[in-house]
Image (spheres, rainbow, N blue to C red):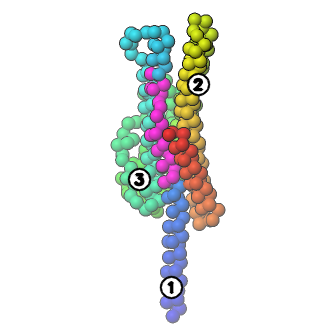
Amino acid sequence: MNRLFFKNILLLFFLVTTLTGCVNLKYVSDFSSSSLKSIRNFEEIGYSFTMNCLENCQEEKVNNLSFIALECDCQANKSADSVTLIIYNAVKGYLDGLSNLSNNSLTNYKVNVVAKSLNQQDYKSLNIEKTHVDAWLNISNILFKAFTNKYRRSKIKEYVNAGNEPLKVLTGFLDFNLSENLSGKLNVQKQRLKDYYFDLTNDTTLSTFEKRNAAADYYNRINKIEDKQKELTTYSKILKKVAGGHQKLTDNLQRLNKDEVMEQLIQYSSDIQDLITEYNKIAK
């Protein structure tokens, strides 16, 4: 009887532990799914370094009344878009893997997504540092290992611990490149428009009606630029929130049973969902 009682206690303990683990991973799954969904808003950003370059080039031709079909030199901007996409795909792939692991699914990350490498020599003009390359390589290795070894949920701690630092570096790079570099180019564009339209409104050969139309056109164009900047700012908030939530998850991998940890992950998931809503309102 004692033996039967002891076996029942062990069985009960096993069931409770298993159920608790499932509940805990549900919150990890919710966080990773929300993070993945929010990160994918990158694909909805209807602007790029190349587009900015083409706009500036065409604007200059219009202002100079030039109809000569000279090609715009946007190679550096194309490189900026290329490296941004490489970094984004690595971040998205990592979160996709985390989402699958926390759902006890095989990671289905496509290895060919990271086939295009991040190399300092290819992007000399973009200030790509060794830390960025190393972070990209680490994420790529984690994903390759997860895919080829068919990681299961039991490996989630190893996955998160290995991925936290490179994820922080890559989201930081993506954030700076979009919210500072690309948004900065839009600031330059705004200043150029202001100078151009200021000259128009001071042109004595134009009528008051023409000047008012020029002023209306100016504010319309400025509003469109600022809408783009709002998208980039909100996406920046998303990146920071995802990185912060992942850091919290990493710090508490041994304490996932604790109510306060679950509550924090729930809060991060909720905050990310709010940012998705905010982004969607701006993007419409």
Residue drawn at (41%, 58%), measured in percent from left and top? 151
Above or below for 55 versus 27: above
Q: What is the three-letter code of the residue carrying label 1?
A: Asn
Q: Nearer the viewer, mark 3 or mark 2?
A: 2
Please, what secondary structure does the residue beneath circle 3 have?
helix
Image x and y of residue 68, in percent: 39, 9
Apparent side of residue 266 relative to residue 99 in the rendered image (left or right):
right
- Taking the magenta stretch, the answer to whether it contains residue 200 is no
Q: Nearer the viewer, mark 1 or mark 2?
A: 2
Residue drawn at (48%, 49%), measured in percent from left and top? 37
Q: What is the three-letter code of the residue carrying label 3?
A: Ala
Give the extent of the magenta segment: 33-54
Front residue (pair 138, 20): 20
Apparent side of residue 69 relative to residue 227 in the rendered image (left or right):
left
Q: Which residue is mark 3?
A: 146
Image x and y of residue 61, in percent: 45, 13
Q: Which residue is mark 2?
A: 219
Q: For marks 1 and 3, give the CA distance.
A: 36 Å
| CB atoms of marks 3 and 2 within 8 Å | no
Q: Is residue 58 visible?
A: yes
Front residue (pair 3, 75): 75
Q: For marks 3 and 2, give the CA distance.
A: 51 Å
**Mark 2 neighbour class, 10 Å CA radius: few under 14, some 14 to 19, many 20 or more:** some
Quadrant of the image occupied by residue 230: top right
